[in-house]
Amino acid sequence: MKQQIANWLGLLVLIVTVTPLWAQDSPLLDNHRWQEYSYGVSILPPLGANVHKRSVDDAVARITTKDGYAINLFIKESQNQMNIDAARKDALTQMAGAFPSAIVLDDQINKIGKHQALKLHFYLPRTKQGPWVTAQTFVQLSPTAFALFQLETPKKTYELARPVYEAVIQSMQVSDPRKLLADREKLLDAGHQLLETLKFDQLKKQLVPEQWFRFVQGDRDIGYMRIRQAHGKLDGRPIHDNSVMERLGFKVEVMARIEFGKSLYDSVNTCYVSDEHDEEIWSIRTNERPIGARKINQLHLRSESRLKFDVQEIPVDFKNAWVETGLLSNRKIRLSRHDPSSDKEFEWDMPPKGYLSQVDLYLLPMLLADQPDGMWGFYAYHPNSGRISFRTERVEHKNNGRYVVYSRLAPEDIQEQITEYNPNGTIVKRTLPGGRMLIPAERHQIERLWPQFVK
């Protein structure tokens, strides 16, 4: 749960889309189709569920629900041809070896669309989690490949989870992956051409020094956010080694505090990109602390206009903190991530085209005011998944001069972020997945709503 919250806070600091693929409505399923690109498999997830893919994972999608059960999707490949009967034999043998007390609840071969499918449901009376049900459905995609759906649920929620699980499987469609990749490449080409024509330099006079927001869920304030933008050196300290910190560039700082359950989460994201867009640095820090005035320090906010890379002084308790630092240099992207249980290092090549820095995620929408309605594809680092992902941005203009950017940060994200902008690029309103809202506010309003935290 803590990792989910930290990732969600990291996701909040991004402003960023894909056109939904519509399918027939279902009372159990979302209307936005999730798409896998290697084999062209797509599904409709359960209503209100979260779909994600971990940075290191053999599942192509993991679906979690508020009711406590999970649905996972794998693509299983074999060097040798295998039919449904052979898959059934292997699955039964493996389950008997892992759980000798497993009881078969369902065992049948049928079809999902044009594809042969095997359905197996097992009751596991003795597990560490208590009585459990594991369901597996193998759908044959080719002589050597299967889509494997897996339901994991406590026995007490099995009857609730089963119809949803089966509806997800029945929603499966398979498209030609070559066409999907060709369509994605067209969007990337459009995004690359857009970046080549945009004049980021003109934003120097358009930057918003400071803007505050309320986090609202329903009729209740649950937190606040501040976004600051500036142009200049990465840091004002005297450095003379011709490093990135001596170069001029754009800087963005996002500070957020949000209540979740009995805890408060502080998140600070500071990012910088050089004017030439060939070097960038970003840092995201999230800290959890219990709610209670005596246990929470006030958040001291510096009022000076110069934005320094280390402007925020939020103390980091590494037992309850998530910290990451990213660096782009010499077309290599390096990332260090710390969470309460591990420290990891990653490195990727910079995508050859359509790459957005973390700063660009804030500045690009400001430049779309002068663009016609359209959609573009890009690559960018996605803190929620801890990897570089494909994403799109789509803009629609309104009659009053405002424009709306519909944002999906990664293909596996089901719900969009919807942000409305004034003609000058300032945010009017943002609707986050799950219905939470970001609403602009004056600092004195935030101080009145959260007097014990802001001064």
Image (tube, rainbow, N blue to C red):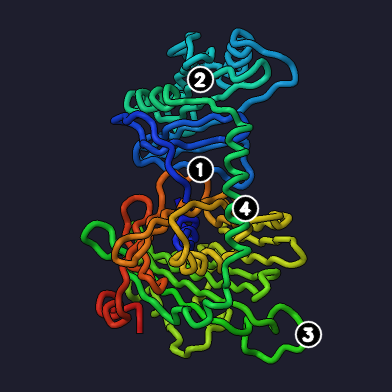
Residue at the image point whose x is 62% and y is 57% from the top: 192
Tag 2, which secondary structure? strand
Q: Which mark is residue 388?
A: 4
Labels 1 and 4 touching (C-beta < 8 A)? no
Total marks in image: 4
Looking at the rendered structure, which numbered label has been put on residue 412? Answer: 1
Q: Is residue 432 visible?
A: yes
Residue picked out by circle 3: 241
> How far separated are the C-alphas under marks 1 and 4?
13 Å
The amino acid type found where label 2 is placed reads Thr
Q: Secondary structure at mark 4?
A: strand
Above or below: residue 441 compared with residue 120: below
Disc 2 packing (10 Å; few <14; some 14–19; many ≥20): many
Taking 46 as reference, is 379 left or right? right
Q: Earlier in the sequence, mark 3 or mark 2?
A: 2
Label 3 and label 2: CA atoms lie apart by 59 Å
* SS assignment at label 1: loop
Q: Which residue is mark 2?
A: 137
Nearest to viewer (mark 3 / mark 2): 3
Say whether disc 1 or disc 4 marks the residue closer to the N-terminus: 4
Specify few, some or many for label 3: CA neighbours under 10 Å numbering under 14, 14-19, or 20 or more: few
Q: Is residue 181 above or below residue 227?
A: above
Marks 3 and 4, how far apart in space?
A: 30 Å
**Amino acid type, mark 1:** Glu
- Percent position of residue 417, x then y: 40, 54
Nearest the viewer among 279 and 236 is 279
